[in-house]
Image (spheres, rainbow, N blue to C red):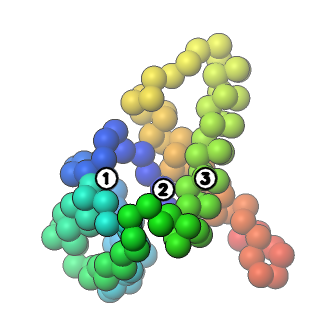
Amino acid sequence: MLAGFVASKGNDEYAVKHACMHLGRLGHKRVTMRSDQENAIEELARKIESKTAVGIVHNEFSVGESQSNGMVEKAVQNVQRQVRIMSSGREERSGTKLKRDHLISALLVIHVANTINRQRAGLDGRTT
């Protein structure tokens, strides 16, 4: 799972750069992107595709049918929950509340995804 923080939907240059970097690291020549036909996501995918050599196969499901992409929805919920937990703990310890657009907020999303990846148990019951 890869996760990143963007300030707004759509053509966000940081999101494009971040996605291209990760696609390059994965080493695949082609990936499948699932989306719900939302204009902002389609625009982002087109921009990413134009800036990387990785081929993107678009797999769209009906608008409002997020249940058909349950695995992704569950991953998003897990990241959001863990970000809230870690933010709350940091705020409690420091006594200060960070603004949503603070750099630490962006880094926390990436850290949470990496932590979830490391702690997830495989089919053999072991963590990576």
User: Where does residue 23 sit, x and y in percent of width and height?
Assistant: 36, 71
Residue that label 2 marks: 3
Relative to 81, 7 lies left or right: left
- Mark 1 or mark 3, which is nearer the start of the sequence? 1
Q: Amino acid at mark 2?
A: Ala
Task: Identify which residue is drawn at 56% across, 18% down.
Answer: 97
Image quadrant in which the C terminus is located = bottom right
Mark seen at residue 61 = none
Along the viewing direction, whichever of 12 and 65 lies nearer the viewer: 65
Disc 1 crowd rating (10 Å Cα; few below 14, some 14-19, many 20+) is many
Residue placed furthest toward the left: 50
Mark 1 residue element: helix
Residue that label 3 marks: 77
Residue placed furthest toward the right: 125
Residue placed furthest toward the bottom: 29
Disc 2 crowd rating (10 Å Cα; few below 14, some 14-19, many 20+) is some
The residues bearing labels 1 and 2 have C-alpha atoms spaced at a distance of 10 Å
Along the viewing direction, whichever of 74 and 25 lies nearer the viewer: 74
- Mark 2 or mark 3, which is nearer the start of the sequence? 2
Relative to 109, 17 lies left or right: left
Task: Identify which residue is drawn at 20% across, 68% down.
Answer: 46
Mark 2 residue element: loop
Residue that label 1 marks: 15
Along the viewing direction, whichever of 23 and 79 lies nearer the viewer: 79
Q: Amino acid at mark 3?
A: Gln
Residue placed furthest toward the top: 95
Q: Amino acid at mark 1?
A: Ala
Q: Nearer the viewer, mark 3 or mark 2?
A: 3
User: Where does residue 123 sit, x and y in percent of width and height?
Assistant: 77, 81
- Mark 2 or mark 1, which is nearer the start of the sequence? 2
The residues bearing labels 3 and 2 have C-alpha atoms spaced at a distance of 12 Å
User: Where does residue 91 sit, x and y in percent of width and height?
Assistant: 64, 22
